[in-house]
């Protein structure tokens, strides 16, 4: 596996943005920029050996700076929603910006998806790894603690895109990092994802209200459109009149993974029948957010000139459960001072013939 580095543009303040290309011996390629730690492209073969880019995104830095869709980005400090933009920690209330209706979303107005990370190609276990580092200062977006964050991206010879998240804070804080890549295994510009088949290794999911905020209720998937315990086409459930589908405008929900011990385990599988492309998701996190691209609304002039209409891509975001600070029976995103936040997520690509 080799990593190369090229210029991708400049921030408004003149700082350089770089694009890193990770290539393995099978010809799989992943491109990542150090703005937002964004995955720009993922090129993988179909059942006939034809390579296509399966990640939605843009061709140029200006689009990433000015058209905020979270395409491919690392989101944080706290991915997903926090009720009323407020949480209490050690008896102190922290008011965050409300940037998603009445709630806080993905770390605020300038979350980790909108900052410039320090990029470095390092050696780990004998192979090259892209390390992206960022210091989120005490009070940034009104979160407590100086938080040192490192994201490691690597590509295996088994076509695994490995993302390792590491963080440490000098004060008690909250951390919930995830990657917001939109996938379409037929190709990023191929249309909607309704024909994709999905399996999620979870028997339960967390209910949401009309603002897509978790209510604290944990529901069984059995007998509902949320039952993806076997590979299941996505499209039919999107047409359901199930109250939770209506609340989410489609799928925008967290599944409670069957594996809750913090060890790396399979979380999901995604299959696109016409191309044969198959993606497996592994994570150490307790939850995964399946988002069916409900708010994509005909975004024009995207990568390769593509237009991304409704449900042109889907997200499988590994995470702590949304709004966990309000629901004490959810796994906690609190990170104590000096403790290490360590999580791994793997997206593995192959074909089924």
Image (cartoon, rainbow, N blue to C red):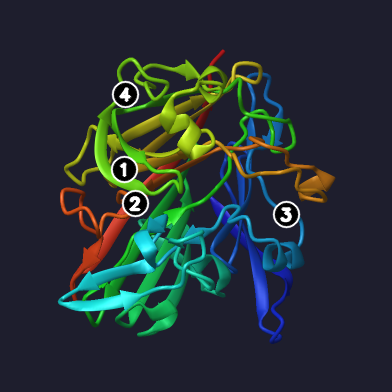
Q: Are marks 3 and 1 in contact (CB under 8 Å)?
A: no
Instruction: Return the residue at label 1.
Output: 287
- Marks 2, 3: nearer the viewer: 2
Instruction: Return the residue at label 3.
Output: 58
Give me the C-alpha separation between circle 3 and circle 1. 28 Å
Lower sequence index among marks 3 and 1: 3
Badge 4 marks a residue whose secondary structure is loop
Lower sequence index among marks 3 and 4: 3
Instruction: Return the residue at label 2.
Output: 322
Answer above or below: position of 124 versus 290.
below
Lower sequence index among marks 1 and 2: 1
Residue 136 shows up from this direction: no
Instruction: Return the residue at label 4.
Output: 221
Considering depth in this image, is 140 or 4 the residue closer to the camera?
A: 140
Give me the C-alpha separation between circle 3 and circle 4. 35 Å
Give me the C-alpha separation between circle 1 and circle 2. 9 Å
Give me the C-alpha separation between circle 1 and circle 4. 14 Å
- Marks 3, 4: nearer the viewer: 4
Q: Are marks 1 and 4 in contact (CB under 8 Å)?
A: no
Decide if residue 345 is on the left or right side of residue 188: left
């Amino acid at each position: 596996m080799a990593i190369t580095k090229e210029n991708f543009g400049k921030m408004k303040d003149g700082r350089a943005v770089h694009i890193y290309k990770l290539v393995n011996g099978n010809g799989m390629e992943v491109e990542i920029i150090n703005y937002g730690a964004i995955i720009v492209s993922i090129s993988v073969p179909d059942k006939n050996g034809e390579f296509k880019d399966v990640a939605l995104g843009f061709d140029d830095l200006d689009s990433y700076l000015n058209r905020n869709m979270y395409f491919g980005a690392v989101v944080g400090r706290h991915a997903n929603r926090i009720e009323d933009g407020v949480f209490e920690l050690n008896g102190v209330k922290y008011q965050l910006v409300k940037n998603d209706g009445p709630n806080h979303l993905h770390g605020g107005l300038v979350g980790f998806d909108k900052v410039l990370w320090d990029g470095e190609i390092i050696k780990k276990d004998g192979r090259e790894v892209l390390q992206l580092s960022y210091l989120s200062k005490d009070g940034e977006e009104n979160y407590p603690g100086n938080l040192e964050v490192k994201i490691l991206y690597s590509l295996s010879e088994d076509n695994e895109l490995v993302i390792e998240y590491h963080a440490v804070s000098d004060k008690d804080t909250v951390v919930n990092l995830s990657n917001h890549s939109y996938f379409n295994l037929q190709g990023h510009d191929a249309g909607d994802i309704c024909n994709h088949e999905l399996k999620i290794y979870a028997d339960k999911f967390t209910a949401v209200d009309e603002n897509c905020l978790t209510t604290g209720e944990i529901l069984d998937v059995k007998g509902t459109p949320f039952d993806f315990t076997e590979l299941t086409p996505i499209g039919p459930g999107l047409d359901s009149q199930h109250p939770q589908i209506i609340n989410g405008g489609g799928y925008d929900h967290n599944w409670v993974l069957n594996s809750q011990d913090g060890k790396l385990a399979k979380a999901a599988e995604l299959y696109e029948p016409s191309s044969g492309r198959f993606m497996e998701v592994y994570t150490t996190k307790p939850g995964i957010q399946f988002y069916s691209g409900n708010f994509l609304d005909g975004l024009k002039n995207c990568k390769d000139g593509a237009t991304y209409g409704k449900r042109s891509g889907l997200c499988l975001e590994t995470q702590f459960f949304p709004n966990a600070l309000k629901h004490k029976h959810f796994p906690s995103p609190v990170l104590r001072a000096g403790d290490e936040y360590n999580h791994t997520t793997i997206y593995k690509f192959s074909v089924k013939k």
